Amino acid sequence: MLRAGYQVALAENGLQGVAIFKSQAIDLVITDLLMPEQEGIETMLQIRGEHPSVPILAMSGGGRMAGTMDILHTAKLLGAAKTFSKPFNPMDMVETVRSILD
């Protein structure tokens, strides 16, 4: 799939995302932090453990169990290149991706 000029691989959750990450060359990861099957923080830790230099962008709308700012702060501490609080302007994400990859 091609989005905003980039080849994009989609995953429904962190488990699928890590499997895709392991099966092909990925230049940048965008993850939600609250997902079924495997949360974004765990996903980030797995990716960081195997490929510490791959940039990760993290997003969250919060949720019932965690405040948005707390979980985004945790993602930043774990090495997220940038975090986004939902809702956000999609063009902000595209511009961030461009600035990292170009």
Image (cartoon, rainbow, N blue to C red):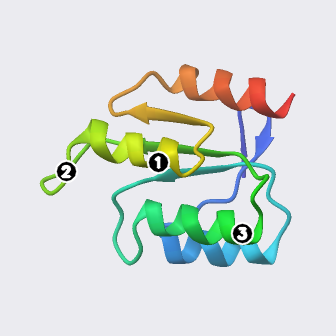
Residues at badges 1 and 3 in contact (C-beta under 8 Å)? no
Instruction: Name the amino acid type tagged 1.
Output: Ala
User: Which residue is found at the position 53% from the left and 67% from the top?
Assistant: 43
**In front: 84, or 80?**
80
Do tag 2 and tag 1 residues touch (Cβ < 8 Å)? Answer: no
Tell me the residue that label 1 is attached to.
Answer: 75
Residue 44, by quadrant, is bottom right
Mark with earlier residue (2, 3):
3
Tag 1: Cα neighbours inside 10 Å, few (<14), some, or many (≥20)? Answer: many
> How far apart are the alpha carbons under marks 2 and 1?
15 Å
Question: Could you tell which of marks 2 and 1 lies nearer the N-terminus?
Answer: 2
Q: Position of residue 80 (x, y in %)?
A: 58, 44
Viewer-side residue, 41 vs 23: 41
What secondary structure is marked by label 1?
Answer: helix
Amino acid found under the numbered disc labelled 2:
Gly
Q: What's the residue at 76%, 52% (across, down)?
A: 54
Q: CA distance from mark 1 to mark 3?
A: 18 Å
Q: Which residue is mark 3?
A: 21
Q: Which mark sits nearer the N-terminus, 1 or 3?
A: 3
Label 3 element class: helix
Tell me what residue is drawn at x 62 percent, y 73 percent.
18
Q: Provide the residue designation for mark 2.
A: 63
- Per the model, the C-alpha gap separating discs 2 and 3 is 26 Å
Q: Position of residue 71 (x, y in %)?
A: 33, 47
- Location of residue 36 (image quadrant): bottom left
